[in-house]
Every structure is written in C-alpha cells, then in structure tokens.
Image (cartoon, helix red, strand yellow):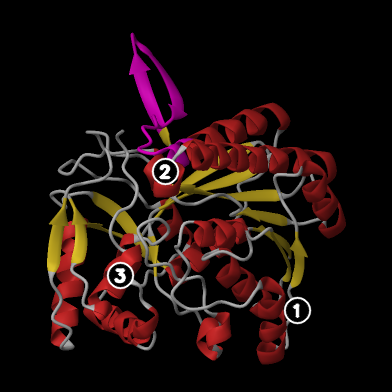
C-alpha cells in the first residue's frame, strides 16, 4: 500500500514508518521538526540523541535495504500538504502531526496558541487535501483516551446510544478533556465527523492511551533507529519517566494521591493497532472510533511495579508524592471498553516484570545522560 505518515519523525511516527517499510509498503513521511524544536526550547530533549530524519532514513536503508521517502515540510501549510498528497496518492494517511504534550499546551499563551493552531490546522488541511486529490484514501487519525476524561460511567468505544423522552439516537461519547492539548483532539474528532457525514470520507480515529517502550524489531538493529525517548515532565509519558527516574536514583514523582487511572500500551502494540486499522478500513462515509490500550493502571500501581522490579535489580527505587500540578481527579471511576482492536486481531504485549526489567536495562546504558532538572513538574494547570 502507499502509506503517507504525517509526523514521521516522532516517538510513534518513526517506528511506524520503519515497521511499514519493512513489510513492503511504500512509505513517505513528512515532518517539520516541531517537536524537536519545542523540546529544545523547553530544555526537554530526548535521553538518546536521535539523528535527524535524513540520517535516520539513510541508516534504515543501510541496515534493512528498504526505502522510506521523506519530506521536510509543515503540514499546517495547506499547499505543502496538498502537494505531498497529490504526489504520493496515498491509500492510507496516518496523522500523527500534532503537538502531543498536555503540559506544554498549559505552559503559557504562546504554547497554548501554537498547540491550538497547529493541531487544528493540520487536521483541517488533511481533510481538505484528501477530499481534493485522494477521496478514496483512508485517514487514520491518532486521538487520545484523554478526550473522554474520567466520567462516572463506563466509557464506550467512541459512541453512546441515548434514550431521552422515549426516543433513541447515537452520538459521539461526551468528551471532558483535561488539558488544551486533549481539547484539540476533541475538536479534531468533531471536524472529522462533520466531513465524514457530509462528504463521505472514511476515517479511523484511534483513542490511544499513554505509550511506553523503546524496542521494535527495527530499532533493535541499531541505536540510531531508536524512537525519541523523552523522560522529562513535559514530553515524557509516565512509564518512561518513572523508568528513567529509577535508573538515575531520583524518587518517582507521583502527582497527588496517585489514584489517577488510565489505559496504557506498549510501543509494539501501537504499531499493531495502526496496522490493523490500516488493513481493515471502515468504508466510505464512516467514522470508526477504537479505544487503543491493552491494560489499565493507576499511577500508584505503575510506581509499585517500577519500584519492585528496580529494587530487584539493586536500584534502590524510592517514591515521592508531590502536590499535583494538574487539575484532575486523583481518585475516580474508570472503566473504558476496548474490544474493537482485539476483535481485529490485536495480540497485546503486557507490562510484565520481565518487560519492565528489559526497559530498565536499556535506559541504564544511558544513565550518564539523565538530567535531574528535567524531572520535577515545571508547568502548573491553575494560575
């Protein structure tokens, strides 16, 4: 298949590009290095130095013999994106090209404006470019479980059937995002749903939980092919943060009571989910929503796993509860449905003690590059 990946330099975009190219798909990636730039601006660079996209593509070709086509360009510029879509004529467009950090989006006016303008502009441009020159293309959009918030009812898979005054209808499940970043994802979904039902696009919207991990079959071949592994408070997901803190001897930073519960998945399972969505398109005029995670944990449960495994390796891991910098429920009901991807054939990689030890041992190789100043929360939700 002809696959166009927007945000192909990112933590998820680059492993996706390698995985699909290794399987024989024609892969083109687009990126403008936005995440790298704002990571530098906020003193939040990745733990492992990652080559630029040109060097990554060359290294992948050298090791695998496979080609990945590459465009350095801004998807928020409609005419740049339109030109790429016209040239590639993708069967599938995978949309990762958004500012992905909740803390960054809450940092200040400039960061909030960048998040809002970039994320909505790119999604809007994707919709129009596909409508104009590739109307049969399947858009696979990365959403987030954070769109739902933590309602006191079960979270269904995208949709909710409601009976009101004797009548029934089906609506998108109510969203209650907890950051501006997550709110832009809600608005993405609304935009996509409008254009699906009005112009007959076909879209899969993947509501993904936080991702952890480093290894994919391709990245294990050479350290130059590692994804962007962030451990800081702005771009680092909680599992990756805790792993790095454990290795560096920094107490695990649990925000508030630590009862915040979310659905998590291994990086390997992200690749599976994207592929399953790609190979099973929903059909024209449909918006399919899939909740993308494999198991759920509270922050306290994650800290307990990291501490238990780390101590078994002699790391002397401690846990520290901090005043929560975010505005969120710290003790809540959480029961989301996630059967759609399992029905398509997802085979999960669960967070076992053995897998946690593997991750800790990889990060141990880079212990000298860990900067404690990047760990403590630097962004407050309330002002």
Location of residue 275 in the rendering, given as x and y in whole percent from the top left corner: 57, 64
Q: Would you name the residue on which mark 1 appears?
A: 67
Q: Earlier in the sequence, mark 3 or mark 1?
A: 1
| Residue 360: quadrant of the picture | bottom left
Q: Would you name the residue on which mark 2 appears?
A: 107
**The one of 370 and 9 positioned closer to us in this rendering:** 370
**The one of 373 and 7 positioned closer to us in this rendering:** 373
Q: Earlier in the sequence, mark 2 or mark 3?
A: 2
**Measuring 67% from the left and 72% from the top, which residue is drawn there?**
53
Q: Is residue 169 magenta?
A: yes
| Residue 93: quadrant of the picture | bottom right
Crowd class of label 1 (few under 14; some 14 to 19; many from 20; radius 10 Å): some
Q: Earlier in the sequence, mark 1 or mark 2?
A: 1
Q: Is residue 116 above or below residue 291?
A: above
Location of residue 163 in the rendering, given as x and y in whole percent from the top left corner: 35, 18
**Measuring 31% from the left and 33% from the top, which residue is drawn there?**
383
Crowd class of label 2 (few under 14; some 14 to 19; many from 20; radius 10 Å): some
- Residue 372, numbered circle: 3
Identify the secondary structure beneath mark 1.
loop
In the rendered view, does 47 fall on the left or right side of 140? left
Q: Which residues are magenta?
A: 160-183
């Amino acid at each position: 298949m002809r696959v166009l990946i927007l945000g192909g330099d990112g933590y998820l975009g680059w492993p996706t590009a390698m995985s699909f190219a290794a399987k024989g798909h024609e892969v083109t990636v687009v990126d403008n290095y936005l995440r790298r730039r704002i990571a530098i601006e906020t003193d939040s660079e990745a733990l492992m130095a990652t080559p630029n996209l040109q060097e990554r593509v060359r290294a992948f070709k050298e090791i695998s013999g496979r080609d990945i086509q590459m465009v350095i360009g801004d998807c928020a510029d409609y005419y740049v994106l339109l030109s790429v879509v016209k040239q590639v004529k993708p069967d599938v467009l995978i949309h990762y090209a958004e500012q992905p950090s909740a803390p960054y989006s809450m940092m200040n006016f400039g960061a909030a404006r960048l998040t809002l303008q970039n994320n909505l502009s790119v999604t809007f441009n994707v919709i129009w470019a596909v409508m104009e020159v590739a109307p049969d293309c399947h858009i696979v959009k990365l959403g987030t479980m954070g769109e739902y918030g933590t309602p006191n009812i079960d979270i269904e898979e995208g949709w909710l059937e409601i009976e009101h005054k004797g009548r029934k209808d089906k609506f998108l499940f109510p969203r209650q995002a907890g950051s501006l970043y997550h709110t832009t994802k809600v608005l993405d979904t609304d935009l996509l749903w409008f254009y699906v039902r009005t112009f007959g696009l076909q879209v899969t919207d993947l509501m993904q939980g936080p991702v952890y991990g480093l290894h994919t079959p391709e990245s294990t071949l050479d350290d130059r092919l590692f994804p962007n592994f962030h451990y800081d408070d702005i771009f680092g997901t909680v599992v990756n943060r805790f792993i790095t803190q454990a290795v560096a001897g920094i107490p695990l930073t649990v925000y508030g009571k630590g009862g915040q519960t979310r659905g998590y998945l291994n990086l390997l399972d992200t690749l599976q989910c994207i592929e399953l969505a790609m190979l099973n398109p929903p059909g024209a005029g449909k918006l399919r929503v899939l909740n993308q995670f494999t198991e759920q944990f509270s922050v306290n449960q994650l800290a307990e796993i990291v501490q238990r495994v780390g101590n078994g390796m002699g790391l002397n891991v401690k846990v520290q509860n901090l005043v929560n910098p975010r505005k969120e429920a710290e003790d809540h009901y959480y029961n989301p449905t996630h059967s759609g991807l399992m029905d398509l054939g997802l085979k999960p990689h669960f967070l076992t003690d053995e897998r946690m030890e593997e991750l800790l041992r990889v990060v141990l190789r880079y212990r000298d590059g860990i900067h404690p100043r990047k760990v403590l929360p630097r962004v407050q939700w309330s002002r």
